[in-house]
Image (cartoon, rainbow, N blue to C red):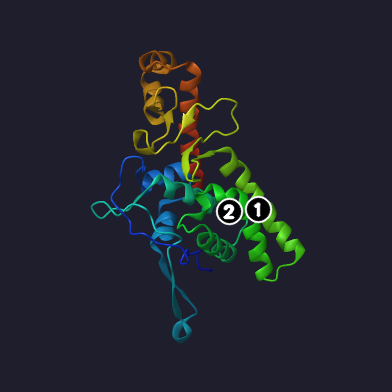
Amino acid sequence: MSDPPSTTGARRPDASEPTLGTGLYAVAEAARLSGVSAARIRRWIKGYDWSRGKDKNRHRHHSPPVWRPDVAPIEGAQALSFRDLVELRLVDAFLRAGVSWKRLRAVAEEASTRFETTHPFSTRRFVTDGRRIYAQVSRDAGDTLEDLQTHQFAFRRVISPTLQGGLEFSDAGTALRWWPEPGRGDRLIVVDPRRSFGQPVIDAANVPTSVVAAAVKVDGEKKTADWFGLTLKAVRAAVKFEASLKKGAAKKSRK
């Protein structure tokens, strides 16, 4: 088992109390929105101990946190910011694309130092500079051309739908909001840390998708649309989105 990446080369400001616009997610909610299990999230943000070998040859190791959350624990419970949520989704996407922990660690270290941030994957600069960082890390590791092509392919699989399509950045390059349906012609649902504490909402009416989906179960699509002043298209998009989150969580739990 390889250690997860640690952005030790980056500046690490202390976690703080949540402020307006930070977004606030309990670990369970971050798991629901990202599709990453709550157990894995806790391991990634807290680090963990593991052993190798048997009996007298058994050695204990410690894997440091992948990154440090922006938000300090609230009454002993860890919480994540919107920036943490974006970083979480990107780390998971790279792993699912076949990037090893060792390679991810090296890329995270290089990007953190270059961008001077503890959350390198959730920056706009990573969209443009990430490929060159991958190339540099591959050269330093003595990879073959085939290795480099494999890693670049994994990079494109993650960057195209996740960063270029779904995230919107500020002029300073910070992730502002996430549109979880980048393939749609119109954007109906948004995750914005300045709205409803970062919960997914119908963009036009600022109504949480979870509230819309729950209302549909009781009153049906038409009454729900009338009650919240939504189009049927928006109502159906909210229901479909919430169903996709539940489906993703169920699929993860079976693994």
Instruction: State the image coordinates of residue 238 (x, y, percent, origin top left).
Output: 46, 27
In the rendered view, does 155 fall on the left or right side of 52?
right
Q: Residues within 10 Å of mark 2 (few under 14, many from 20)?
A: many
Q: Are marks 2 and 1 in contact (CB under 8 Å)?
A: yes
Q: Which mark is residue 94?
A: 2
User: Which residue extends farthest right?
Assistant: 145
- Name the residue rendered at 44%, 36% in the picture: 191
Q: Residues within 10 Å of mark 1 (few under 14, many from 20)?
A: some
| As drawn, 231 above or below 106 | above
Residue 255 showing in the rendered view: no
Viewer-closest of 19 and 5: 19
Viewer-closest of 61 and 170: 170
Viewer-closest of 130 and 248: 130
* Label 1: which secondary element: helix
- Name the residue rendered at 30%, 47% in the picture: 18
Q: Which residue is mark 1?
A: 154
In the rendered view, does 185 fall on the left or right side of 171?
right
Name which of mark 2 and mark 1 comes first in the sequence.
2
Residue 179 showing in the rendered view: yes
